[in-house]
C-alpha cells in the first residue's frame, strides 16, 4: 500500500486529535457528523456491494448504521475518522468504479474497512426495501412454512418436464448391467 506524505500527515493529525477522545469521558463526540460524511460512506457501501436497482437511500440507511457502529467506542472512532479522512483526501465518491475498487483493495486490511464492510453485508441485504426489490417475502413460518405453505410457489420457474427415459423399461425388465450397456453402445465405424 502506497501512502503519500499528505495522507500520512492528515492521518497522523486525525489520530492525534482523536486520541484525545479517550480523555473526554462524558462528552459525546460524533464521528462523521460533518456534511457529506454519510454520503461518502454510502458511496463506499455502493462500491462494495453495487446494485443498479438499489436506490441511493438504501445505501444512505446502511451508511447511517455504519457511522453508528463507528461511534461505538473510542478505538472505533479513531479508526473510523482516519478511514473517512482517507476517503475524503482521495475524493472517493468522484472516482470511477475501477479506481474505487483499487482503492478499497489498498485499505482492505484496515479496521475501518472491516467495520464498514462487515456492517454493510448484513445491513444491506436485511433492508426491507431490498427484500421487495429481490422479491423475498420474508419468513414463512406464520404462513405454514416453506414445505406446506409456499414450497410450490415458484412462479418464476417453468413447469418441470417429467417423462420417462426410452430405455428405462428395457433396463427395468432385465437389470443385467451387460444388457443395459449393450443398449447404449453403437458402433459408428
Image: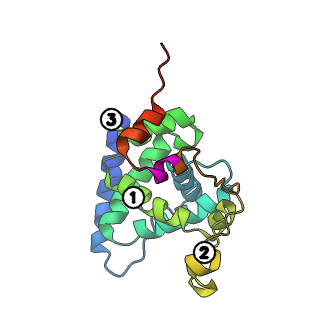
Dot in front, 2 or 1: 2
Q: Quadrant of residue 131?
A: bottom right
* Quadrant of image for the N terminus: top left
| Separation of marks 2 and 1 at Cα, in angstroms | 33 Å
| Separation of marks 1 and 3 at Cα, in angstroms | 18 Å
Q: Are marks 2 and 1 in contact (CB under 8 Å)?
A: no
Q: Secondary structure at mark 3?
A: loop
Structural crowding at the residue carrying mark 2, measured as other residues with C-alpha within 10 Å and reported as few (<14), some (14–19) or many (≥20): few
**Residue 145 % position (x, y):** 57, 81
Q: Nearer the viewer, residue 129 or 172?
A: 172
**In this figure, which residue is indicated by the disc labeled 3?**
3
Which residues make up the magenta segment? Answer: 170-174
Q: Is residue 44 magenta?
A: no
Q: Is residue 13 visible?
A: yes
Residue projecting furthest to the top:
189
Q: Earlier in the sequence, mark 2 or mark 3?
A: 3
Q: Earlier in the sequence, mark 2 or mark 1?
A: 1
Amino acid at each position: 500500500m502506497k501512502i503519500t506524505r499528505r495522507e500520512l500527515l492528515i492521518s497522523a493529525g486525525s489520530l492525534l486529535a482523536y486520541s484525545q477522545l479517550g480523555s473526554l469521558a462524558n462528552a459525546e463526540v460524533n464521528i462523521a457528523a460533518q456534511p457529506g460524511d454519510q454520503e461518502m460512506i454510502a458511496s463506499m457501501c455502493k462500491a462494495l456491494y453495487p446494485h443498479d436497482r438499489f436506490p441511493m437511500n438504501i445505501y444512505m440507511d446502511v451508511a447511517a448504521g455504519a457511522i453508528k457502529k463507528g461511534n461505538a467506542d473510542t478505538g472505533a472512532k479513531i479508526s473510523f475518522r482516519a478511514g473517512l479522512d482517507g476517503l475524503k483526501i482521495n475524493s472517493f465518491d468522484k472516482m470511477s468504479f475501477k479506481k474505487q475498487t483499487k482503492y478499497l483493495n489498498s485499505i482492505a486490511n484496515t479496521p475501518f474497512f472491516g467495520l464498514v464492510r462487515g456492517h454493510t453485508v448484513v445491513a444491506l441485504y436485511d433492508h426491507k426495501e431490498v427484500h421487495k426489490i429481490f422479491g423475498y417475502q420474508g419468513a414463512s413460518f406464520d404462513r405454514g412454512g416453506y414445505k406446506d405453505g409456499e414450497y410450490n410457489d415458484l412462479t418464476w420457474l417453468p413447469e418441470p418436464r417429467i417423462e420417462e427415459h426410452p430405455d428405462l423399461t428395457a433396463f427395468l425388465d432385465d437389470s443385467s448391467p451387460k444388457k443395459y450397456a449393450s443398449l447404449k453402445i453403437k458402433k459408428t465405424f
